[in-house]
Amino acid sequence: MNINATLLAQAVVMIVFVAICWRYVYPPILATMQEREKKISDGLEAAKKADDSLEEAKLAFDKELDKAKADAAEILEKANNRASQIVNDASSKAEAEAEKILTAAATNIENETNKAKEELRQQMSDIIIETTQKILGDEVSKEKHEAILKKAAEEL
Amino acid sequence: MAKELTTESYIDHHLTNLTCGHVGMDESAGIYKSFWTCDPYMVDKMGFWAFHVDSLFWSVLLGGLFIFLFKKGMSKSTDSNTAPTGMQNFVEMCIEFVEDNVQSLFGSVKNTLIAPLALTVFVWILLMNLMDLVPVDFLPVLAGHIAYAVAGGSVDWITSPESFYFKVVPTTDPNITLGMAFAVFVLTIYYSITVKGLKNFVAELTLHPFGKWLIPVNFVLEMVNFIAKPISLGLRLFGNLYAGEMIFILIALMLFFSSIPIGVLGFGLHLVWALFHILIVALQAFIFMALTIAYLAMAHETEEH
């Protein structure tokens, strides 16, 4: 247990080992560890960013989807409106046409009736005059009693 | 010269270093002989300039192992793209442990030497302390037999395997622990002077605690304080490991009683003590490291007095 030069030798040995560790061993290990630490934290950050952008994309997607749905609904409504308008237009047109046809038909009928009445009156007056002529002879002529006849015809 | 194996010689053998030194002898006829030797009977004549070859051998070997492990463990995948495996995990765990400790004790002061120093001190001392867990007789007896087989004929003082001393645990040698404490002490002085400046350093040693009118008293008090740090640092480690080693030796001595119950008890005690000693091994390595960092941190603090 003597104290001797071993002490100095050990001090020198220690300084040599510390120097080796300081110069060659420690820095590369620490550098590697710090580099990896940085890489991991970068990776985590990137993952977080990716998550965020995914969330953002989801939100944008939802928004687009809602907009598309709204657009579709609007288009559908427009189309429905248009369709019903067309149907309405068509039916009103058809009604009008029908009305027109009916009116025309009614007018026609009336005209025909009038014509027929006129003809009938004419024939009747003719028959009456003829008959009267035959009964009364030449006393009664068509020309002479034109005015009376006309009046009678109108009253008929 | 094979001594009879007694309790005393057994303990003695385990506590004696293989010491090599320079001897100068004035023999009776007036012939001055000067030579290097590792003869244990010459130890008294070697004076200060003797070396504990076994302690230094293990110290250098284990220091080299530390450098090798940490260099090798990292070199496989120095790029940061691959996940660390095996040895690299251990290396990084150690580095992180040391970095944490340096961070907590050193705070904001930037000194790139402190962490490598702390790492070296911690792992190296841990490895040296761990030699304590190798069965006490194994390596000394092996070394004795190898030395006797190799040099038994040519070296006059190796007369039997038992005459070759070989202490295995460097940290049970006060030279080793105090040597490391001394290196820390030198670094402390170096940083005290370079960081604080010589003036502040001297002021710290002389103007404290009693002001400038009692400079001699201050100096004596501060000097005791200053010197006590490295000595307590070295002796704490030495004391713990020496005591641990001593207990291993004493437990091993139970085999001398050549009775089976005591032998079994000795075996059990060995196991218990070895398990407990693992704690001391790691704890003392940690304490040495923490105090090294603390002393160097003190060297960086500039207090106003």
Image (cartoon, coloured by chain):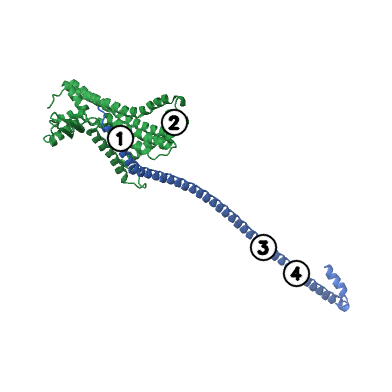
Chain colours: A blue, B green
Write down the residue under mark 4: A111
- Let me know if residue B211 appears in the view: no
Q: Nearer the viewer, residue B121 or A10?
A: A10
Q: Please indicate whether residue B145 sits to the left or right of residue B124 in the image.
A: left
Q: Nearer the viewer, residue B303 or B14?
A: B303
Q: Identify the chain of the residue marked 2, using the numbered disc in the image.
A: B
Whether callout 3 and callout 1 share a subunit is answered yes
Gap in Å between the C-alphas at discs 4 and 3? 26 Å
Q: What amino acid is found at the position of numbered circle 1 in the picture?
A: Ala
- For the N terminus of chain A, which image quadrant? top left
Q: Return the residue found at the far left.
A: B153
Write down the residue under mark 1: A11
Look at the numbered discs 4 and 1 and tell me whether their residues touch, using CB distance below 8 Å: no
Query: Which sits earlier in the primary sequence, circle 4 or circle 1?
Result: 1
Q: What secondary structure is marked by label 2?
A: helix
Q: What secondary structure is marked by label 1?
A: helix
